[in-house]
């Protein structure tokens, strides 16, 4: 079975990462526990732009915890054209 983020993380276009992050943020408006569960499981594989959009409405301390929990190694996917 393929990883649920494999297509999104492989995309080099920043707009794809933004769209996926937006979708996650909107999901969190309806079901915050589901979003947090998803982030706990996959945040280390997410492009940073996608993560930032997904956590945009979190309280500042919680956003910072998500951003700095893992090193931003996934940023290396961005702009490798």
Image (cartoon, grey):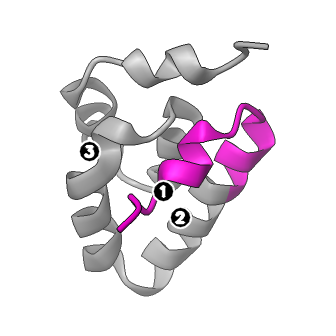
Q: Is residue 66 left or right of residue 23?
A: left
Q: Is residue 16 left or right of residue 50?
A: right
Q: Which residue is mark 1?
A: 57
Q: Is residue 63 left or right of residue 6?
A: left
Look at the image and tell me in which quarter the C terminus lies.
top right
Residue 68, x across and y down, in percent: 26, 24
User: Which of 9 and 68 lies nearest the eye of the viewer?
Assistant: 9
- State which mark lies toward you, 1 or 2: 2
- State which mark lies toward you, 3 or 2: 2
Q: Is residue 69 magenta?
A: no
Real-space CA distance between mark 1 and mark 2, rounded to the nearest whole angstrom: 8 Å
Q: How many marks?
A: 3
Look at the image and tell me in which quarter the N terminus lies.
bottom left
Q: Which residue is mark 2?
A: 25
Q: In the rendered image, is residue 58 in sight?
A: yes
Badge 3 crowding class, 10 Å Cα cut-off, few under 14, some 14 to 19, many 20 or more, is few
Please, is residue 37 above or below residue 63 in the view? below
User: Which of 48 and 26 lies nearest the eye of the viewer?
Assistant: 48
Quadrant in the rendering for residue 45: top left
What residue is shown at x 32% (from left), y 44% (from top)? 43
Numbered disc 2: secondary structure: helix
Label located before the other in sequence (1 or 2):
2
Please, is residue 71 above or below residue 42 in the view? above
Residue 38, x across and y down, in percent: 30, 64
Q: Which residue is mark 3?
A: 62
- The residue range painted magenta reads 1-19
């Amino acid at each position: 079975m393929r990883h649920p983020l494999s297509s999104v993380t492989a995309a080099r276009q920043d707009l794809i990462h933004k769209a996926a992050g937006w979708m996650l943020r909107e999901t969190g408006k309806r079901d915050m526990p589901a979003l947090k569960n998803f982030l706990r499981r996959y945040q280390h594989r997410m492009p940073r732009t996608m993560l930032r959009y997904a956590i945009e409405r979190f309280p500042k301390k919680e956003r910072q915890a998500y951003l700095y929990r893992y090193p931003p190694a996934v940023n290396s996917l961005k702009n490798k054209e």
